[in-house]
Image (cartoon, rainbow, N blue to C red):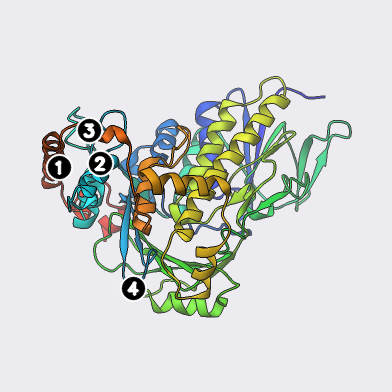
């Protein structure tokens, strides 16, 4: 009923499609596999996500991208974390960094030692023990090498880039490696009468494109995974009620900051993402609590530069497909699900899907066991990111608008309840080792949102007070030494990866 997987058809381009194409061309190659990508210039891409998390460096490495070249081609800047404004309460801010706080000791995280110190009367600012937070505060950046000095922390970072240019760059790389692009709009598909496997897709111009394995990157429409196979959808909008976004770029205003900013608004939140050539802005909101016109006006009135385009509205339903892989179709990106870009996870979830596809890639036949495993693992990935996002809304002191009253008091998943209770009692959330967001991220967000632990892990009592003071001093000294050697973010970009258009200007 099945034939060997030789021809792979990627349905849809954009960031997801070209990330898949570049990865397959590099890992599987185009000598033994025919890789085809179908996209239509008549169909626009969402393209509102422009911020990433550090794991993207692994994808870029696997695909073989040169970092400096990639940044020049995409007008990218560096990202040390996310600043959250007005989330806990109005006129309050905190920073979710990409790196660690201090140095883990005795098999537990540094935060427990800081909590012990604070409980004993210490008044140290925990953010002073994180180099990314300090560098972001000073608008500095430096790529570092691991020098094996635990008190001289490495700088962990990601990128802020133009997602449409990133897709364009990956397309160039993919086509050089033998990926064939077909221009056209898919209007139909043909299935094997006995197996139900898709055998071909039909384009608007009448052309038929056959394939053995199809990867659905068609966006919210889910041309194959939903329109053909009726995969179903887990709707999470009751716990993540924002369902629209209005986005607009504006002229840059000063040197780009090495971090993304998320500012809580009356019915959602607003992003600010600084690139080399412009600033990306958007208001993610719930249509139940504010109208599109009001949200658009709120966004346009808060820009810190001249708008460079008309605002674009995107509508979505937060959730994930009940099945991501059915027969010979796998959905990737928006065709598989959507979680708001609050923690810049959209591109990462594409990357996760690609990694799992490669790990479970079928040989002579598609095995049901691998399909089931893939579906379970992808749902698990989305589910854990979902809980982390919900925590941002639920743990808050804000009660100044109907939206914030709703999210603060709404029913939340039992697993998240357990995590919050554990954190409240002893400052940890017992993360699974495979989870994207580890203890350090949960600490940054939960403590930043106002949930202060009453206790800490008992191992933190294993060292003397004098020894603890000495170690804290060494950590602070190492971070300061690192900061002293860092240039400004703008200076580093100018020296390392200034965009060609800006260099010529």
Disc 1 to disc 3, how far (Cα)?
Answer: 12 Å
Q: Residues within 10 Å of mark 1 (few under 14, many from 20)?
A: some
Q: How crowded is mark 2: few (under 14 residues within 10 Å), some or many (20 or more)?
A: many
Q: How crowded is mark 4: few (under 14 residues within 10 Å), some or many (20 or more)?
A: some
Disc 1 to disc 4, how far (Cα)?
Answer: 33 Å
Disc 2 to disc 3, how far (Cα)?
Answer: 9 Å
N-terminal label among 3 and 4: 3
Q: Name the residue under label 4.
A: 305
N-terminal label among 1 and 3: 3
Q: Mark 1 points at which residue?
A: 482
Which numbered mark, 1 or 3, is in the foreground of this view?
1
Q: In which quarter of the image is residue 455?
A: top left
Q: Is mark 4 on a helix, strand or loop?
A: loop
N-terminal label among 2 and 3: 3
Q: Quadrant of residue 318?
A: bottom right
Q: Name the residue under label 2.
A: 155
- Most foreground residue, 158 or 483: 483
Q: Mark 3 points at which residue?
A: 145
**Residue at image location 45% in from the left, 66% down from the top:** 269
Which numbered mark, 2 or 4, is in the foreground of this view?
2
Question: Relative to residue 278, is residue 391 depicted above or below?
Answer: above
N-terminal label among 1 and 4: 4
Disc 2 to disc 1, how far (Cα)?
Answer: 9 Å
Q: Does residue 175 appear in this view?
A: no
Quarter occupied by the C terminus: bottom left
Q: Is mark 2 on a helix, strand or loop?
A: loop
Q: Which residue lies furthest to the top in this view?
A: 364
Disc 2 to disc 4, how far (Cα)?
Answer: 30 Å
Which numbered mark, 1 or 4, is in the foreground of this view?
1
**Residue at image location 38% in from the left, 58% down from the top:** 449
Q: What element carries label 3?
A: loop
């Amino acid at each position: 009923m099945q034939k060997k997987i030789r021809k792979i058809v990627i349905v849809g381009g954009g960031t997801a499609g070209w990330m898949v194409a570049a990865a397959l061309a590099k890992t599987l190659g185009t000598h033994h596999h025919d890789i085809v990508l179908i996209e239509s210039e008549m169909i626009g891409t969402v393209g509102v996500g422009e911020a990433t998390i550090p794991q993207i460096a692994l994808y870029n490495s696997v695909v073989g991208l040169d970092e400096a070249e990639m940044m020049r081609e995409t007008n990218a800047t560096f990202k040390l974390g996310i600043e959250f404004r007005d989330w806990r309460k109005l006129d309050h801010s905190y920073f979710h960094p990409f790196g660690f706080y201090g140095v883990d000791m005795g098999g537990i995280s540094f935060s427990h030692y800081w909590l012990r110190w604070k409980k004993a009367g210490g008044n140290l600012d925990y953010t002073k023990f994180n180099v990314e937070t300090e560098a972001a505060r000073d608008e500095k950046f430096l790529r570092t090498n691991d020098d094996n000095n635990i008190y001289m922390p490495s700088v962990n970072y990601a990128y802020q880039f133009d997602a449409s240019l990133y897709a364009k760059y990956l397309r160039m790389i993919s086509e050089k490696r033998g990926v064939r692009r077909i221009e056209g709009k898919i209007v139909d598909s043909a299935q094997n009468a006995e197996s139900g496997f898709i055998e071909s897709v039909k384009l608007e111009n009448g052309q038929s494109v056959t394939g053995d394995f199809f990867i659905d990157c068609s966006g919210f429409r889910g041309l194959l995974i939903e329109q053909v196979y009726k995969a179903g959808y887990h709707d999470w909008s009751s716990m993540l009620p924002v369902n629209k976004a209005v986005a607009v770029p504006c002229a840059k205003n000063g040197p780009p900051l090495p971090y993304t900013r998320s500012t809580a608004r009356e019915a959602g939140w607003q992003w600010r993402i600084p690139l080399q050539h412009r600033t990306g802005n958007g208001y993610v909101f719930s249509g139940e609590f504010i109208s599109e016109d009001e949200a658009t006006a709120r966004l346009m009135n808060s820009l810190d530069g001249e708008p460079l385009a008309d605002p674009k509205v995107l509508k979505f339903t937060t959730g994930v497909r009940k099945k991501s892989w059915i027969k010979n179709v796998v959905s990737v990106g928006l065709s598989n699900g959507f979680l708001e870009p609050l923690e810049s996870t959209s591109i990462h979830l594409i990357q996760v899907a690609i990694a799992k596809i490669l790990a479970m890639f079928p040989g002579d036949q598609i095995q049901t066991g691998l399909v089931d495993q893939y579906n379970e693992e992808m749902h698990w990935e989305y589910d854990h990111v979902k809980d982390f996002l919900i925590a941002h809304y639920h743990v808050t002191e804000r009660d100044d608008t109907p939206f914030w009253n709703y999210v603060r008091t709404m029913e939340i998943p039992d697993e998240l309840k357990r995590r919050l209770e554990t954190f409240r009692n002893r400052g940890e959330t017992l993360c699974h080792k495979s989870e994207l967001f580890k203890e350090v991220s949960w600490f940054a967000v939960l403590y930043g949102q106002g949930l202060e632990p009453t206790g800490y892990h008992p191992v933190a009592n294993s060292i003397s007070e004098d020894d603890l003071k000495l170690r804290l001093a060494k950590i602070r000294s190492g971070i300061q030494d690192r900061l002293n050697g860092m240039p400004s973010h703008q200076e580093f970009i100018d020296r390392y990866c200034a965009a060609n258009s800006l260099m010529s200007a």
